Image: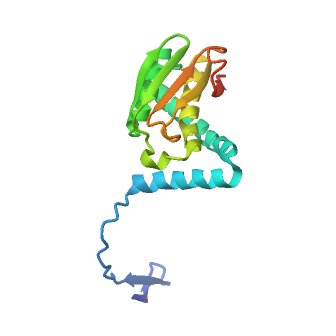
Amino acid sequence: MVDATTQGTQDGATSPVSEVAEVAVPVVPDTGLERDLFLRTLVRELAGTLEETVGLEDAAGYISVVGRRMGAWLDESYREALGVARLDREQVAAVHVDLKARIHGDFVLQESGEEQLEYTNSRCPFEEKVLGRESMCMMTSNVFGLIAAENLGYAKVELAETIARGDGRCRVVVHLEPGSGEHAPGREYFGE
């Protein structure tokens, strides 16, 4: 119920004043809904709608644009936090693992060499919402690829295994030298 009245101001004019009475809201059972679940479901539904509307390849392209922007933001954030103009290979690997841990992924660096970084992951940050939504993997590809390329000059990200495809885990190989992953499927990223 709203009761609109008037109240005088310093110059003698009147302005409306509203009073709102509180309305009792019935208790609703816990549905499990919380912000993280809502946002993961939102991303899943957006990816699914894109995949159904424009196809997997084009959907992956759209999600790649978002992934590149996220990668640029994360790259800048980590460089600033570390106080460096450019990350070295070890720092790139540490950033990849750290950023995934912060969003509840479980990436582990399995191999670190001059030509590649290889990771495995047993828990996707999108959890079960990633199943059957391969285009969502473009977030990892673009974030890892952009950070590696901007700091090391080049990256080709190979999504050798993905939870989204039903592999039960992710295996991501970031090739750091042009030609090192020549025959591997993946996306290439070039630094400035």
Name the quadrant containing residue 18.
bottom left
Q: Give percent across and percent down for residue 170.
A: 47, 32
- Tell me if I can see residue 84 in this picture: no
Name the quadrant containing residue 186.
top right
Q: Residue at x 64, y 40 (%)?
A: 65
Q: How many marks?
A: 0
Q: Give percent across and percent down for residue 35.
A: 40, 55
Is 64 or 169 nearer to us in this picture? Answer: 169
Q: Give percent across and percent down for residue 78.
A: 46, 28
- What colour scheme was applied to this rendering of the protein? rainbow
Is 174 or 148 nearer to us in this picture? Answer: 174
Quarter in which the N terminus is drawn: bottom left
Residue sitting at the far top: 114
Using the image, determine if residue 88 lies above or below residue 147.
above
Q: Residue at x 32, y 79 (%)?
A: 25
Residue sitting at the far front: 167
Using the image, determine if residue 156 lies above or below residue 65.
above
Is 106 or 101 nearer to us in this picture? Answer: 106
Q: Residue at x 67, y 41 (%)?
A: 61
Q: Give percent across and percent down for residue 151.
A: 56, 20
Using the image, determine if residue 93 lies above or below residue 64.
above
Quarter in which the C terminus is drawn: top right
Q: Residue at x 68, y 48 (%)?
A: 55
Using the image, determine if residue 33 lies above or below residue 160.
below
